[in-house]
């Protein structure tokens, strides 16, 4: 792939750093007094999940990682790992450690299609839709006049995730959730 100069190392770019794929989480280019510019970055290792803070100087370059994307179907999770299968090829199954993908998997129902980032033909991480529609399985009844807590209550979704929803949401409703923030956005259908 391409060789990137220090000012081309931008967020969401995937680079080869120390012979491993890293996703750039943040990048800030600045210049201190009479010194040369520096790009202060935060990088996340796609294999281990480790986050590093690295400064790239104006004379440095890095190689963009050769990654590919494939569609996969979410199958199930157990306490140790989450399982997926390549879409259209159910024999090609693979898993991720539970702690590496828990924040994303909690919003996935079985058979949901996700995008998988691969590096050297090995699955590295998943990308899920920004918004998902899930059924409310448990919602405490709203008590009239109970708006001290801002008019929200804690509801359990079909995936087991818990989210704050408005008081008018009932069991059986389908709600739309923003997976980046983990927050309720709207009611899709009423039960």
Image (cartoon, grey):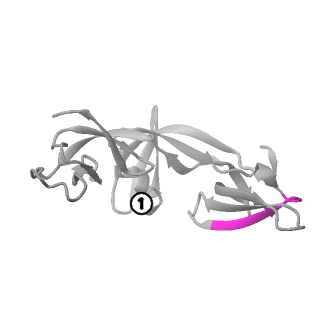
Instruction: State the residue at coordinates (90%, 67%).
Output: 34
Task: Give the x, y percent position of residue 80.
Answer: 38, 63
* Residue nearest the observer in this picture, 13 or 19: 13
Please give the range of residues in magenta: 52-60
> From where the camera sits, is residue 4 visible?
yes
Left or right: 168 as drawn, with respect to 182: left
Left or right: 155 as drawn, with respect to 5: left
Task: Give the x, y percent position of residue 125.
Answer: 53, 51
Would you say residue 180 sits in the magenta stretch?
no
Where residue 21 sits, quadrant-wise, is bottom right
Label tally: 1
* Residue nearest the observer in this picture, 53 or 36: 36
Would you say residue 59 sits in the magenta stretch?
yes
What secondary structure do most residues of the magenta stretch adopt?
A: strand
Task: Give the x, y percent position of residue 14.
Answer: 67, 50
> From where the camera sits, is residue 21 visible?
no
Examine the rendered structure and indicate whether residue 185 appears above or below residue 32: above
Left or right: 57 as drawn, with respect to 130: right
- Look at the image and tell me in which quarter the C terminus lies: top left
* Residue nearest the observer in this picture, 109 or 183: 183
Instruction: State the residue at coordinates (55%, 38%).
Output: 70
- Look at the image and tell me in which quarter the N terminus lies: top right
Q: Which residue is labeled 1 in the image?
A: 98
Task: Give the x, y percent position of residue 18.
Answer: 74, 63
Left or right: 150 as drawn, with respect to 24: left
Tell me the crowding category of disc 1: few under 14, some 14 to 19, or many 20 or more residues within 10 angstroms, Cα based: some
């Amino acid at each position: 792939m391409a060789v990137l100069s220090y000012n081309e190392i931008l967020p969401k770019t995937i680079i080869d750093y120390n012979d491993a794929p890293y996703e750039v989480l943040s990048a800030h280019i600045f210049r201190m007094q009479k010194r040369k510019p520096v790009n202060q970055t935060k990088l996340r290792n796609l294999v281990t999940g480790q986050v590093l803070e690295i400064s790239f100087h104006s004379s440095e370059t890095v190689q963009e990682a050769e990654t590919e994307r494939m569609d996969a179907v979410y199958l199930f999770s157990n306490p140790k790992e989450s399982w997926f299968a390549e879409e259209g090829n159910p024999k090609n199954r693979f898993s991720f450690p539970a702690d590496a993908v828990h924040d994303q998997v909690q919003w996935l129902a079985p058979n949901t299609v996700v995008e998988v980032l691969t590096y050297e033909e090995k699955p590295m991480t998943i990308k899920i839709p920004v918004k998902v529609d899930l059924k409310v399985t448990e919602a405490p009844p709203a008590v009239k006049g109970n708006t001290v807590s801002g008019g929200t209550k804690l509801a359990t979704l079909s995936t087991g995730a818990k989210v704050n929803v408005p008081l008018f949401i009932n069991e059986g409703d389908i709600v739309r959730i923003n997976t980046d923030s983990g927050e309720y956005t709207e009611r899709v259908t009423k039960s």
